[in-house]
Image (tube, rainbow, N blue to C red):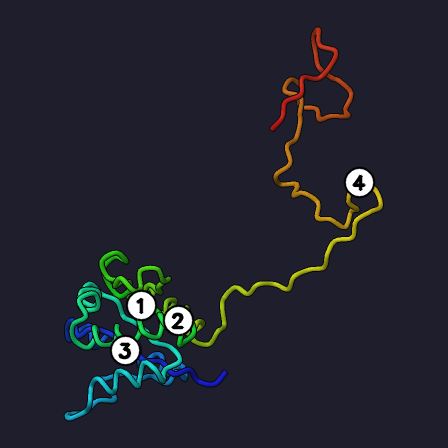
Amino acid sequence: MSSPKCFISYSWDSASHKDWTRLLAERLHENAVEVFLDQWDLHPGADLPQYMESSVREADFVLLVCTQNFAVKANAGSGGVGYEKTIVTGEIFHSLSSPRKFIPILRSGTPRESLPSYLKSKLYIDFRSDSTFSSSLEELLRHLYNSPLHIRPPRGKKPSFGSGSIPSTSLTEPSTTTARSLYCQRCGATPGQKSDCNGPYTSHDFKSV
């Protein structure tokens, strides 16, 4: 596929949070993703609402960097986060875009604290630990490029059945790892072996394991 276009929505929690968001944008940019980020695109005098609206609608994907403050602003409909929520929920409600488009990025807090109400039903990518940033980034990139780690294998053919009531051996046999086995708890013999039990016993005492 061609390079995906990605808009990053986040709250201005702190300077360090803005730095981290820009770092994420840089890593995506290094992997051929076209990123819309206010820190790169806006200038004094720019029309902020128009930028947010066009970015959300033109992007193939929207990353929503979720923190406690992000959730509070989104739920209250305040600031830029609140305005973006209106646009996002409008697209979701009217099915104007793919359900894959809006991706929650959990940056801090618990899902209960940091996912706004309109995102609580969606699966998120966990970016809370900087030690696992690379693996989380790979998970995100796989989603953006539609290259999942695990791919559903091709569906096999219908099994052939014998003419009798018992299916032919083309059916998959039960796993031997789950089958139960028998052994004599006195001498250790398995079924079919001659009895070697000592004393008055003339037959094995089998036990199932």
Q: Which residue is mark 3?
A: 23
Q: Residue at x 63, y 26 (%)?
A: 208
Residue 101 in the image, given as x and y percentages of width and height: 39, 74
Earlier sequence position, callout 3 versus callout 1: 3
Q: Which residue is mark 4?
A: 165
Compared to residue 64, the image places residue 185 above or below, namely: above
Compared to residue 98, the image places residue 129 above or below, namely: above
Determine which quarter of the picture holds residue 13.
bottom left
Determine which quarter of the picture holds residue 155.
bottom right
* Circle nearer the viewer, 3 or 1: 1
Q: Amino acid at mark 1?
A: Ile
User: Of 112 and 128, which appears nearest the observer?
Assistant: 112
Compared to residue 208, the image places residue 8 above or below, namely: below
Q: Which residue is mark 2?
A: 140
Using residue 46 as the reference point, say whether residue 26 is left or right of it.
right
Determine which quarter of the picture holds residue 194.
top right
Q: Amino acid at mark 4?
A: Ser
Q: Amino acid at mark 3?
A: Leu
Earlier sequence position, callout 3 versus callout 4: 3
In the picture, the disc for residue 194 is none
User: Of 44 and 206, which appears nearest the observer?
Assistant: 44
* Mark 1, secondary structure of its residue: strand
Earlier sequence position, callout 4 versus callout 1: 1
Badges 1 and 2: C-beta atoms under 8 Å apart?
Answer: yes
Q: Residue at x 19, y 70 (%)?
A: 77
Using residue 125 as the reference point, say whether residue 161 is left or right of it.
right
